[in-house]
Amino acid sequence: MSIEPMVRAEQVHKSYGQVEVLKGIDLEVQPGQVFCLVGPSGSGKSTFLRCINHLEKINAGRLYVDGELVGYQEKNGKLHELPDRVVAQKRRDIGMVFQRFNLFPHMTALENITEAPTQVKKVPKAQAREQAMELLTKVGLADKAGNYPSQLSGGQQQRVAIARALAMEPKLMLFDEPTSALDPELVGDVLDVMRGLAEDGMTMIVVTHEMGFAREVGDSLVFMDGGVVVESGHPREVLTNPQHERTQAFLSKVL
Ligand code: ADP
Ligand code: MG
């Protein structure tokens, strides 16, 4: 018996107007994996995450999350776009953390975390608060529950953003350069939270330039450039012994 991959991309193409940004991506992310996506700026990493998360529609190929087509349903061999209502439902199962911690500025850390569960999932307030406190404890910020984003450091805000995504109990977490906007001394705490999530068995796709994290925590690594997968394998393998010139050139800059 084979397990269904959490994400499966088959010849995924995505264009903006005349510009083709993803030129046939093939990859699989297995449940429980930490899947690292690396590559130079403009290579299509964010676009690919946005496709997984229903924020963009692919133009060709097939993209599956947990065995289900993203954005479309197949009927009699033809693809039909999913209604917005169904897309919204599916998006709830995927957590996303961006480079910029986009917390709601007028809400406390706790309120940021309880907002979606109470509004979208109709979780009772008391239960949502209890769960939020557990999540804040998990990310090491139980004492900051009442703080507004402006009263938190960038690293603390990013940890609240992770807790907020977890509050929806996603089956997949997407991280788009979650530490790139942080002062260097704040990066470690965020990576530690991500490491903990990995140990809990969360399936994660992580776009990052933190090669130490990729090497220690990653199960799989894909190097993308120009909208294609140039090379993939176990992070230690790819990072110590890159086969392609483009991978070597990129790694020599970030390592
Ligand atoms: P990465 O995350 O690897 O830096 P992106 O996925 O952000 O790459 O971008 C890949 C390419 O797609 C870039 O050339 C970028 O300018 C282009 N692009 C991204 N988003 C859009 C958009 N909404 N409209 C037009 N072009 C876009
Ligand atoms: Mg990007």
Image (cartoon, rainbow, N blue to C red):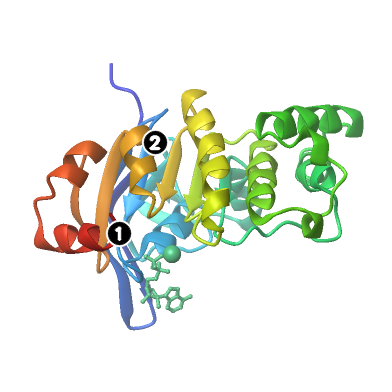
Residue that appears at 56% across and 43% down: 190
- SS under mark 2: strand
Task: Mark 1 vs mark 2: give the one in front.
Answer: 1
Q: Is mark 2 within 8 Å of ligand 2?
A: no
Please name the residue shown 72% across and 29% down the image. Answer: 137
**Left or right: 180 as drawn, with respect to 16:** right
In the rendered view, does 213 fall on the left or right side of 237?
right
Classed neighbour count for the residue bearing mark 1: other residues with Cα under 10 Å, few (<14), some (14–19), many (≥20)? few
Quarter of image, ligand 1: bottom left
Where 197 falls versus 12 (above or below)? above
Q: CA distance from mark 1 to mark 2?
A: 20 Å
Does residue 228 appear in this view? no
Residue marked by disc 1: 254
Q: Which quadrant is the C terminus positioned in?
A: bottom left
With respect to residue 180, does 211 lie above or below?
above
Task: Say what secondary structure mark 1 lies in.
Answer: helix
The foreground one among 105 and 81 is 105
Residue beneath the point at 70% across and 36% down? 167
Task: Say whether disc 1 or disc 2 marks the residue closer to the N-terminus.
Answer: 2
* Whole-percent x, y for residue 18 in the image: 33, 83
**Given the image, on which type of amino acid does mark 1 rest?**
Val
The foreground one among 255 and 124 is 255
Find disc 2 in the rendering and name its residue: 34
Between residues 180 and 206, which one lies in front from this camera angle?
A: 180
**Residue most toward the bottom?**
18
Res. 206 mark: none
Residue 95 can be seen in this image: yes
Who is closer to the viewer here, 49 or 92? 49
Q: Quadrant of the N terminus?
A: top left
